[in-house]
Image (tube, rainbow, N blue to C red):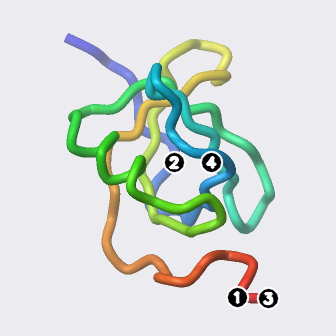
Amino acid sequence: MATTKQISSRRTFRVADPVDDDGDLTVIETVTDTAFHVVDYADPLLRDKLAARDVGSTVRLDLAPVDPAGLDWMVTRVLPGSPAVPFAELN
């Protein structure tokens, strides 16, 4: 049983690039401008939800690290309530 601790709780992220064929995705935390490389999803539906998002759109996520160095991340939840407009239009 996995003991990975979820450390990214309900923060807002900007989609930096589309989900690629391997499922990889880069999201950027909107407050700190920190990039997170997503390589896994707790459920295939989460991948589908993020693949449907446009680059630049924002989404609230829960992430968990998949390696000890925190270089790769897994999406554990996609949360409701994020803005429906692309991040660039919010400025």
Distance in Å between CA atoms under marks 4 and 2: 12 Å
Q: Earlier in the sequence, mark 3 or mark 2?
A: 2
Which residue type does callout 2 highlight? Ser
Which residue type does callout 3 highlight? Asn
Which residue type does callout 1 highlight? Leu
Distance in Å between CA atoms under marks 1 and 4: 17 Å
Viewer-side label of 4, 2: 4
Residue contact between numbered discs 3 and 2, judged by CB atoms under 8 Å: no
Q: How many marks?
A: 4
Element carrying mark 4: strand
Q: Residues within 10 Å of mark 2 (few under 14, many from 20)?
A: some
Distance in Å between CA atoms under marks 3 and 2: 24 Å
Which residue is outermost to the front? Answer: 21
Residue contact between numbered discs 1 and 3, judged by CB atoms under 8 Å: yes
What residue sits right under mark 1 in the picture?
90
What residue sits right under mark 4 in the picture?
27
* Residue shown at the point (65%, 65%) measured from the top left: 56
What residue sits right under mark 2 in the picture?
8
7 sits to left or right of 41: right
Q: Residues within 10 Å of mark 4 (few under 14, many from 20)?
A: many
Distance in Å between CA atoms under marks 3 and 4: 18 Å
Q: Earlier in the sequence, mark 1 or mark 4?
A: 4
Q: Is residue 27 above or below residue 67?
A: below
75 sits to left or right of 89: left
Element carrying mark 3: loop
Position in image of residue 16 (x %, y %): 68, 51
Q: Earlier in the sequence, mark 3 or mark 4?
A: 4
What residue sits right under mark 3 in the picture?
91
39 sits to left or right of 43: right
